[in-house]
Image (cartoon, rainbow, N blue to C red):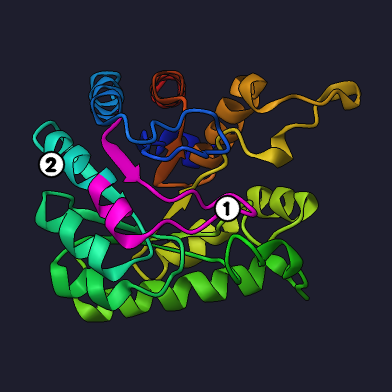
Amino acid sequence: MTAAWHQLRPPEVMGIVNVTADSFSGDGHGDATSDAIAHGAALFAAGCSIVDVGAVSTRPGADEVPLELEIARVQPVVLALSKLGTVSIDTTNEEVARQAIGAGATWLNDVSGELGALAGELGASYIGMHRRGTPKTMQSMTNYDDVVDEVTDVMVEACRRAKAAGSPQVVGDPGIGFAKTFSQNRVLLKATRQMADRLANEGFGLLIGVSRKGFLSEGLGQRQYPVGERLEQSVAAAVWAMVNGAKILRVHDGPETVFAAQLVSEEGKQ
């Protein structure tokens, strides 16, 4: 075993609670507040250390959600779950972030990468993601000279802004699946260690979120796997990211990923 393997520690597993009607992953709760709260509670009970609550789908082609509806969906869920553990609000809207952090969220998960200063102002920990365009336009914006370097540059700058504003913990997210082709997603996942090391050099962590995403849909023998049949691929990708330095794994399949992370980290201690 290598020295790096012996130093392995379990990452934070962030379980996803989608309070949306159009989640790509098929687990959105829409306006069913009690179901969303129960889902989040189950994720905590399974060992997830963070629960990420969002009310706007960010899948390619997704529609916008009115501000009042986004707040109405996330507010009661954040309020209830923050009594049970650490809650993150997944939003790009400043007012939603303010309301959710006021209700008890302590992390701001920002797919726009533009709200770092707000996180610092509110005293929230921050996840700054790389994305181009909007859900409607991002898949037409996939031209890169060097996808790893360019994505990492954007992550680092977003993290620096949050740190300068006073955010207590800052993490970068390469935005796998956002304004990237399937092959670019695979290149980024393979470059997890490179991205993690560059962020760590500046005091930042790396989040990897690949759970159930489309680039995992092609298996051996070119079989196509629908979104509901990507558990094994999702857990395998999460373990890869963990071994290669990711500090947070953002996942739909919380219990399975927690188990895998604990198993791998225990093996690493032998």
The location of residue 125, given as percent across then percent down, is 24, 60
Q: Nearer the viewer, residue 51 or 19?
A: 19
In the rendered image, which quarter contains the N terminus?
A: top right
In the rendered image, which quarter contains the C terminus?
A: top left
Name the side, left or right, on which 186 lies relative to 131: right
Give the residue at mark 1.
62
| Residue at 72% from the left image edge and 70% from the top image edge | 141
| Residue at 31% from the left image edge and 43% from the top image edge | 53
Name the side, left or right, on which 12 lies relative to 60: left
Among numbered discs 1 and 2, the one appearing first in the sequence: 1
The amino acid marked with disc number 1 is: Ala
Query: Which residues, given as a range, are shown in magenta?
Result: 48-72
The location of residue 13, given as percent across then percent down, is 36, 35
User: Does any portion of residue 10 appear in the rendered image?
Assistant: yes
The location of residue 215, given as percent across then percent down, is 72, 41
The location of residue 126, given as percent across then percent down, is 30, 62
Residue 136's place in the image compared with 89, above or below, is below
Give the residue at mark 2.
79
Q: Nearer the viewer, residue 76 or 116?
A: 76
User: Does any portion of residue 170 appear in the rendered image?
Assistant: no
